[in-house]
C-alpha cells in the first residue's frame, strides 16, 4: 500500500492553495501517475485538513498531457447519505442508471458512455455517512473499474474502502491544525407519508429516511425506491411529484395520486397512465424490450409491447388495457419491431435477421418482394436497428451506417461513429429517417439527400431507443439514452421536453395524439405534454 505522509519541517501546514502543502503535492503526484492505484485514501484525525484538501483538488487546474483531455473531477459529500443515496448520486454524475448500490459497479463496467479521459471521484466525510460501512463497500466495488479513480476522505478510526492496491495520503502530523468546528445539526426527516413534505425536502435526506425504515408509507416509499435516481435528479418539488406520480403502483393509498398530481401541476407533463410490475387493474404488460405504435387499419390505437423473451403483446394506447398477442415465429429475443401501414409487422431478432408477421389485409406484391430482398441481405449482413414507412425498410448496422431499402432503389448514409442503436422513420410531406447511435447522437436524414450535418440531439451516453410519428403540431421524435433520460423533440423545431422514469429506459413510442410512452424492465408510462 503506497503511502505519502506529509510532515512539514517547521511544524506548520501551508494552505493547499499555496502549492507548497505536502498533501497537495502527494495528491497531484497520484493524480498524474497513470500507474498509480485507482483508490487514494486521504487519512487523518479531525481537523487535519482532509476536506479542505479535497475541495482544493476539485478546483485545481492541472495541465493535461499533449493529446489527452483533462481528467474530470466530481466532488461528492458523503455526510448524512445512505449507500442508496450515494449510489444514485454517483450513477447520475457518471451517466448510468442504478436501481440499487449493487447495480452501480456492473452498470459502470458495461457502460458505453462517452467521457473525455478518466473520471476522478472526490468523496468527503465517509465517517459522517448514514451507513459508512455500506458506503465503503460500494466505493470498493467502483475502485475496481479501470477508468474511474477515487479519492476518499477517511477519518482516523473509520473503516476505509478495501482495494487490491491503494495509495494513502496521511495528513496526521504534529503541525498546527485549526480547531474542528462543531458539525451543524442534521435536519429533521420530513413526514415520510406526506407527499407534499417529501417532494419539498432534500431528496437525499428522504432517501436516507426510506432506506432506514421498512414501512411502506401508503406506497410512497415503494414509488421512491422504484424511481429514486430520477426523483433525486428532478427539477424542484413539481418535478419530483411528477416522477413519484408515474412510479405509484395500483395498490398505493388512493389519496396519493390527486395530492401528487396537484403538486406536479408546474411540470411540463401530465400523466395519462402508468403500469408497474405487480399491478393487476389493468395488468402490467410485462418487462419492455421494444415498443411500436400501430400505423392504422383495424389495429389503430394499439401499442405493441415486446419483452425480453420474444413475446409481443398488444395494449390500448388510451389505457394500456390488454388486447391479445402478436402471433409470430421469430424465436428468441426481439431487438426491434416496425409496424407498417398495411398491418404487417416487421421484427428484427437478436441475430440481426428480419421476420415478417402478415396483417389481415393482403400485401402488394412489390412490398413482398422488397421485404424478401431485405431479409436476404440481413441474413448475410445482420442489422442492429429497424424501421419502416410506405415503400421502404430502414436498417442500421454495427459500422454506423443507415440503409433505406426502397422500391426505387437503395440509399445509404454513414451517420454515426460506431454502432447504430435505433432507427425510426416518418411518412410526412417530406419523409425522413431518424437514427441514433452508440456515439450518443440523434440524426435526421431524407433518403436520397445528404444527412443533416448537425445532430438533432446529443448526449454523452449511447442512444438506446427512438420512435417518431406525425402529430397534430408536426412530427415528433422520442429519443432515450442509456443515462435514463428521454426527450420529446419536435422535428421541425419547437419546445423540447425531457423526462426520466428512474429505471433504465428500454423503449419509447410517440402516439398519434403526440403522447409519449416510455418502457422499462418494470414499468410502462404514458405522458402528455402540457
Image (spheres, grey):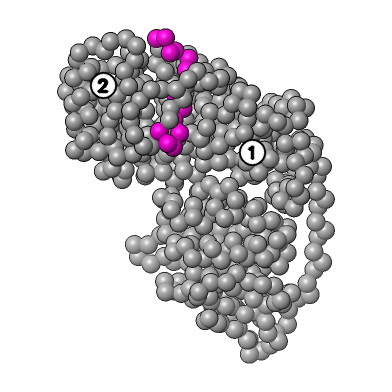
In terms of image quadrants, where is residue 445? Answer: top left
Q: CA distance from mark 2 to mark 1?
A: 41 Å
State the residue in front, 78 or 25.
Answer: 78
Residue that appears at 58% across and 78% down: 169
Residue that appears at 37% across and 44% down: 438
Using a 10 Å C-alpha cutoff, classify the residue at mark 1 as few (fewer than 14 neighbours), some (14 to 19) or many (20 or more). Answer: few
Residue that appears at 69% across and 56% down: 82
Q: Position of residue 369 (x, y in %)?
A: 18, 19
In the rendering, which numbered label is found on residue 392? 2
Query: Mark 1 = which residue?
Result: 235
Residue 497 visible somewhere in the drawing: no
Residue that appears at 52% across and 65% down: 143
Using a 10 Å C-alpha cutoff, classify the residue at mark 2 as few (fewer than 14 neighbours), some (14 to 19) or many (20 or more). Answer: many
Residues in magenta, as a range: 297-310
Please, is residue 184 above or below residue 374 in the view?
A: below
Residue at the outermost bottom position: 9
Query: Given contact means CB atoms under 8 Å apart, are the residues at marks 2 and 1 in contact?
Result: no
Q: Position of residue 99 (x, y in %)?
A: 58, 47
In terms of image quadrants, where is residue 430? Answer: top left
**Label 2: which secondary element:** strand
| Left or right side of 260 for 292 | left
Total residue callouts: 2
**Label 1: which secondary element:** loop
Residue 292 visible somewhere in the drawing: yes
298 drawn magenta: yes
Mark 2 or 1: the one toward you: 2
| Left or right side of 291 for 176 | right
Amino acid at each position: 500500500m503506497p503511502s505519502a505522509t506529509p510532515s512539514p519541517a517547521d511544524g506548520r501546514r501551508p494552505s493547499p492553495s499555496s502549492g507548497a502543502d505536502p498533501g497537495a503535492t502527494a495528491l497531484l503526484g497520484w493524480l498524474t501517475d497513470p500507474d498509480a492505484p485507482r483508490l487514494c485514501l486521504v487519512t487523518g484525525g479531525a481537523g487535519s485538513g482532509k476536506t479542505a484538501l479535497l475541495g482544493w483538488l476539485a478546483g485545481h487546474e492541472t495541465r493535461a498531457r499533449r493529446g489527452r483531455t483533462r481528467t474530470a473531477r466530481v466532488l461528492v459529500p458523503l455526510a448524512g447519505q445512505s449507500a442508496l443515496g450515494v449510489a444514485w448520486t454517483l450513477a447520475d454524475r457518471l451517466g448510468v442508471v442504478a436501481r440499487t448500490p449493487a447495480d452501480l459497479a456492473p452498470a459502470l463496467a458495461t457502460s458505453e458512455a462517452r467521457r473525455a479521459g478518466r473520471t476522478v471521484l472526490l468523496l468527503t466525510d465517509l465517517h459522517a455517512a448514514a451507513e459508512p460501512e455500506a458506503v465503503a463497500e460500494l466505493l470498493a466495488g467502483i475502485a475496481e473499474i479501470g477508468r474511474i479513480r477515487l479519492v476518499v476522505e477517511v477519518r482516523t478510526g473509520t473503516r476505509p474502502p478495501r482495494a487490491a492496491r491503494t495509495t494513502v495520503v496521511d495528513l496526521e502530523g504534529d503541525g498546527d491544525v485549526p480547531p474542528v468546528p462543531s458539525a451543524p445539526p442534521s435536519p429533521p426527516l420530513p413526514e415520510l407519508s406526506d407527499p407534499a413534505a417529501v417532494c419539498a425536502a432534500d431528496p437525499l435526506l428522504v432517501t436516507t429516511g426510506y432506506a432506514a425504515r421498512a414501512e411502506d408509507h401508503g406506497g410512497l416509499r415503494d414509488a421512491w425506491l422504484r424511481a429514486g435516481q430520477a426523483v433525486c435528479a428532478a427539477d424542484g418539488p413539481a418535478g419530483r411529484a411528477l416522477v413519484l406520480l408515474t412510479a405509484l403502483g395500483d395498490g398505493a393509498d388512493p389519496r396519493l395520486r390527486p395530492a401528487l398530481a396537484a403538486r406536479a401541476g408546474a411540470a411540463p407533463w401530465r400523466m395519462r397512465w402508468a403500469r408497474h410490475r405487480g399491478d393487476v387493474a389493468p395488468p402490467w404488460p410485462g418487462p419492455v424490450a421494444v415498443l411500436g405504435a400501430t400505423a392504422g387499419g383495424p389495429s389503430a390505437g394499439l401499442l405493441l409491447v415486446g419483452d425480453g423473451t420474444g413475446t409481443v403483446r398488444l395494449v390500448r394506447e388510451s389505457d394500456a388495457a390488454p388486447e391479445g398477442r402478436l402471433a409470430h415465429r421469430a424465436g428468441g429475443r426481439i431487438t426491434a419491431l416496425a409496424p407498417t401501414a398495411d398491418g404487417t409487422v416487421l421484427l428484427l431478432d437478436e441475430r440481426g435477421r428480419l421476420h415478417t408477421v402478415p396483417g389481415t389485409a393482403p400485401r402488394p406484391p412489390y412490398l413482398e418482394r422488397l421485404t424478401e430482398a431485405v431479409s436476404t441481405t440481413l441474413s448475410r449482413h445482420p442489422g442492429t436497428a429497424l424501421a419502416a414507412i410506405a415503400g421502404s425498410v430502414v436498417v442500421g448496422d454495427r459500422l454506423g451506417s443507415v440503409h433505406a431499402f426502397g422500391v426505387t432503389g437503395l440509399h445509404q448514409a454513414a451517420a454515426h461513429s460506431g454502432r447504430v442503436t435505433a432507427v425510426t422513420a416518418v411518412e410526412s410531406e417530406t419523409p425522413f429517417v431518424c437514427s441514433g447511435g452508440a456515439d450518443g447522437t440523434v440524426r435526421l436524414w431524407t433518403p436520397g439527400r445528404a444527412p443533416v450535418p448537425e445532430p438533432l440531439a446529443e448526449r454523452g451516453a449511447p442512444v438506446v431507443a427512438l420512435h417518431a410519428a406525425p402529430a397534430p403540431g408536426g412530427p415528433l421524435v422520442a429519443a432515450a439514452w442509456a443515462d435514463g433520460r428521454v426527450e420529446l423533440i419536435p422535428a421541425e423545431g419547437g419546445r423540447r421536453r425531457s423526462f426520466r422514469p428512474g429505471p433504465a429506459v428500454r423503449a419509447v413510442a410517440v402516439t398519434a395524439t403526440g403522447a409519449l410512452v416510455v418502457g422499462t424492465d418494470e414499468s410502462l408510462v404514458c405522458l402528455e405534454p402540457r
